[in-house]
Image (spheres, rainbow, N blue to C red):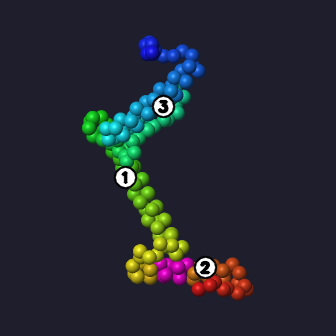
């Protein structure tokens, strides 16, 4: 038994409209996922509800920003200007710097040292010795009468 055709117009009842939105959104995302898997296509879907809530889907092995960049390149439509591109590059640079600092922090904690060259290990040792010296100096200033014993 088939479904009857409905007239495509705005649903006036807000409860019915919300239910229809949720069901159709789920169906749309399901179809996007299916076409991505079946046809090895890069798919991105962005949906904003009438309340302004964002729903999105992006096929695995890609990102929505990559899909939007491809769209902008292939369609000739400008989605963002050079200022946004430079901000994106700055974000990427800061993320990379953060990653490097996280690695350096792990090294200073004594983790993941096996991959380091002797030159890098010497630099870490010097940084730790400088930190230890600074800590002793600060302890001497804060507590001049207390004996200082920091394990070496």
- Provide the residue designation for mark 2: 135
The answer for how far apart the CA atoms under marks 2 and 1 are is 38 Å
Say whether marks 3 and 1 touch (CB < 8 Å). no
Q: Is residue 14 above or below residue 121?
A: above
**Where in the figure is residue 40, as x and y percent of width and height?**
32, 41
- Provide the residue designation for mark 1: 89
The answer for how far apart the CA atoms under marks 3 and 1 are is 34 Å
Say whether marks 2 and 1 touch (CB < 8 Å). no
In this view of the protein, can residue 15 be seen by the observer?
yes
In the rendered structure, does residue 129 fall within the stretch colored magenta? yes
Looking at the image, is mark 2 or mark 3 nearer the viewer? 3
**Where in the figure is residue 3, as x and y percent of width and height?**
45, 16
Which residues lie in the magenta part?
124-131
User: What SS does tag 1 mark?
Assistant: helix
Q: Is residue 64 above or below residue 121?
A: above
Residue at left 46%, top 67%?
A: 103
Say whether marks 2 and 3 touch (CB < 8 Å). no
In the rendered structure, does residue 69 fall within the stretch colored magenta? no
- Provide the residue designation for mark 3: 26
Question: Which is more N-terminal, label 3 or label 2?
Answer: 3
Residue at left 54%, top 21%?
A: 17
Specify the principal SS of the magenta part: helix
User: What SS does tag 2 mark?
Assistant: helix
């Amino acid at each position: 038994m088939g479904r009857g055709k409905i007239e495509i117009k705005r649903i006036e009842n807000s409860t019915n409209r919300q239910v229809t939105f949720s069901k159709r959104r789920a169906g749309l995302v399901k179809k996007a996922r299916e076409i991505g898997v079946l046809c090895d296509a890069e798919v991105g879907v962005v949906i904003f509800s009438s309340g302004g809530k964002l729903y999105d889907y992006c096929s695995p092995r890609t990102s929505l920003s990559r899909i939007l960049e491809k769209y902008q390149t292939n369609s000739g439509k400008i989605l963002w200007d050079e200022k946004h591109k430079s901000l994106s590059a700055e974000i990427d640079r800061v993320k990379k710097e953060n990653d490097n600092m996280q690695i350096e922090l792990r090294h200073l904690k004594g983790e993941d040292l096996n991959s380091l060259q002797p030159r890098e290990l010497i630099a870490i040792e010097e940084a730790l010795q400088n930190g230890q010296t600074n800590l002793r100096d600060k302890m001497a200033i804060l507590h001049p009468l207390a004996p200082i014993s920091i394990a070496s």
